[in-house]
Image (spheres, rainbow, N blue to C red):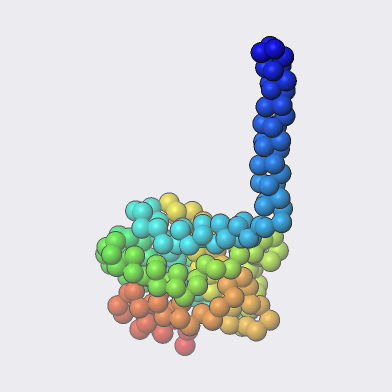
Amino acid sequence: MATYRSTRVLPVALIIIIIVIATVGLTYVARLLFFSDNSGVLSQADTSQAALTSTSANRAVAMTVRGAIVADEDFRSYQVKVTPNQRILTIYTGYQNQPIDNITIGNNIPAYEQFVYALNRAKLMNNDEATGDSNDTRGVCPTGKLYEFQILKADKSVKKLWTTSCSNARGSLGLSVSTLTNLFIDQIPGAQTKIGSIWR
């Protein structure tokens, strides 16, 4: 009699375990399919935010501004690069980026942290980076200015967004540049005077 009961109970227990496992599996799959909360989009935004606000020694943020497309001798551009240790303004002449002026001053992690968090609150890296031809800035806005903003890790670009002063070439930034350019320029005392003399 005991043997008969155990042979009946064993298959029933096995069937119950299989039903429970199948129910849990189906519930998990249903949640993934029907209750997705765009976590892929959120994780990409979170990744950009983490990259921007990192204060590791090999991190940096940079703004590069290119002037109108003119003769090589008259072409000017500049870059403001900020790291946890330094703040650098470099002014270039020509399309081969020959440095003609420079300000380099020290920085510290608390100051850098405040700066990158201000950029983050200004939504600097909220948009997606353009790809392919949409990210090709050669020749865009030939009579105005091109603004590029980058997160760097060990001097390699992690993410780059750009825009221009021309209404027909808005780029990937999706923001007004005035707040961002002011934040960068204000990091370096005397930068405004030097930049103001580039384009006369």
Q: Residue at x 61, y 70 (%)?
A: 172
Q: Quadrant of the N terminus?
A: top right
Picture layout, residue 171 above or below residue 36: below
Would you identify the image quadrant in which residue 140 lies? bottom right
Q: Position of residue 3 (x, y in %)?
A: 68, 11
Q: Tell which of 12 and 115 is nearer to you.
A: 12
- Outermost residue toward the front in this view: 1
Q: Residue 111: percent from the left, percent from the top?
A: 29, 67
Q: In the drawing, does residue 160 fall left or right of residue 34?
A: left
Residue closest to the eye, 31 or 133: 31
Location of residue 155 by image quarter? bottom left
Is 187 or 1 nearer to us in this picture? Answer: 1
- Residue at x-position 45% and y-position 78%: 181
Q: Position of residue 176 (x, y in %)?
A: 54, 81
Give 118 or 82, whichever is nearer the viewer. 118
Position of residue 10 relative to residue 192, above or below, is: above
Rendered view: 76 above or below 61: below
Image check: 107 left or right of 75?
left
How many dots with numbers? 0
Residue 11 found in image quarter: top right
Q: Is residue 77 visible?
A: no
Residue at image x 34%, y 65%? 113
Q: For the point 71% across and 35% down, which residue is it?
A: 19
Residue 189: image x %, image y %? 30, 77
- Residue at the limit of the structure toward the bottom, as seen here: 200
Residue 85 in sight: yes
